[in-house]
Amino acid sequence: MSEKPVINYGLEGIYVDESAISKVDGQNGKLWYRGYSIENLAEQSNFEEISYLLLNGNLPTNNQYEEFVEKLKERRDLPKEVKEVIKVMAPVSHPMDVMRTATSMLVMYDKDPNNRESGATMYKVVTLLAKLPTIAAATGRFREGKDYISPDHSLGHSANFLYMLTGKKPNEFESKLIDLMFILHAEHSTNASTFSVLVTASTLADVYSATTSGIGTLKGSLHGGADEAALNMMNAIGDPNNTEKYIEEALEGKQRIMGFGHRVYKTYDPRAKLVRSYLEESLTKEPLDEVKRLLQIVLRAEKLMIDKLGKTKGIWPNIDFFAGPLYRVLGIDSQMFTPIFVASRMAGWGSHVVEYWHNNKLVRPVEWYTGSIDLPYVPMNKR
């Protein structure tokens, strides 16, 4: 038998492609979309402009921006049959299961779903970008027994989502908060779900199949579901005064503290810093008692974890730690966190599909076999 090769479990540290879409500097806590720092984009841009940037490689002119926004608006609504399926599934299924099924259904309304020409691919991606927030909002409404709310074209992309979910038009601060979360979740290099999307796309399957693959991957608690898991941990802590005791006992029992540590970032996640700052600002807006309690837990847990593990083992807060409390500022239920992730990450997924298909190669890794060889077959009556 040949010598065993070096195996990078989980493909850690393995380069699988080249990309000009985003760069993550895990050692220094930096993130860029198409060369623009996430801090500048979060403060000066909006999700629609950033989606255009990711998909096209450049910031739009005013005319390009208006045309792109109009395309999103005119494609927001859902076919009747998709709404009906969401209404049936939402009360009994996890919202991510609804997202996966409803997204897959959209292929029925594409007359040429396998067309991979550049213009056709972009049309499909923009259509999904427009409809995924609506699927998420409809899921949230129907799971609570409420009526579907039609899109409001006077609202921006993320603000419209929040309106369709809650039934209340967001104010300026609320609109900024939800847009911030859409921006920060839009893209993050070749993470698990993006890789899943690319594996499916590399087979030359259609965009809907690739997106459905991404949704399935994003559902896991180690990826998209991490913010929900982190909030569940905070609710388990309950009283802020119980924070240190809970975390100390969890660490002693070698339990994972959700919202801390990252496969790439070995310092403070730059997205987490941005969310944290807006969480603190929300305290000046007369938040609910629940939000005050969560923020107290967040700050105490953050200090303890940084002192114990951040400076010594490189385990720092990531965006998932602060996302849950920020969503609660907006009154969003925890099971809706990951569908929001889907709605925003479509910008990144679509950008990677567009880029990858310019030089497509079937993804086919190899594995090292550790089983037996040439075993004799024993007939069933002699076993």
Image (cartoon, helix red, strand yellow):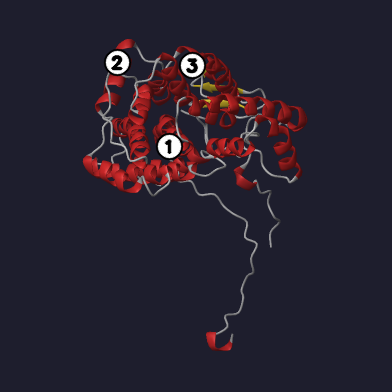
What number is the disc on residue 339?
A: 1
In the rendered image, which quarter is residue 173 located in?
Answer: top left
Badge 2 local density, few (<14 within 10 Å), some, or many (20+)?
few
Q: Is mark 1 on a helix, strand or loop?
A: helix
* Closer mark to the observer between disc 1 and disc 2: 1
Relative depth, front residue between 98 and 74: 98
Three-letter code, disc 3: Leu
Query: How far apart are the two marked residues, 1 and 2, measured between alpha carbons?
Result: 26 Å
- What residue is shown at x 37% (from left), y 22% (from top)? 159
Relative depth, front residue between 43 and 134: 134
Query: How far apart are the two marked residues, 1 and 3, measured between alpha carbons?
Result: 23 Å
Three-letter code, disc 1: Pro
Label 2 near label 1: C-beta < 8 Å?
no
* Closer mark to the observer between disc 1 and disc 3: 1
Q: Name the residue under label 2.
A: 66
- What residue is shown at x 66% (from left), y 30% (from top)? 240
Q: Name the residue under label 3.
A: 41
Image quadrant containing the C terminus: bottom right
User: Residue reaching furthest bottom?
Assistant: 381
Q: Is mark 2 on a helix, strand or loop?
A: helix
Counting from the top left corner in percent of width and height, residue 110 is at 24, 40
**Above or below for 224 versus 36:** below
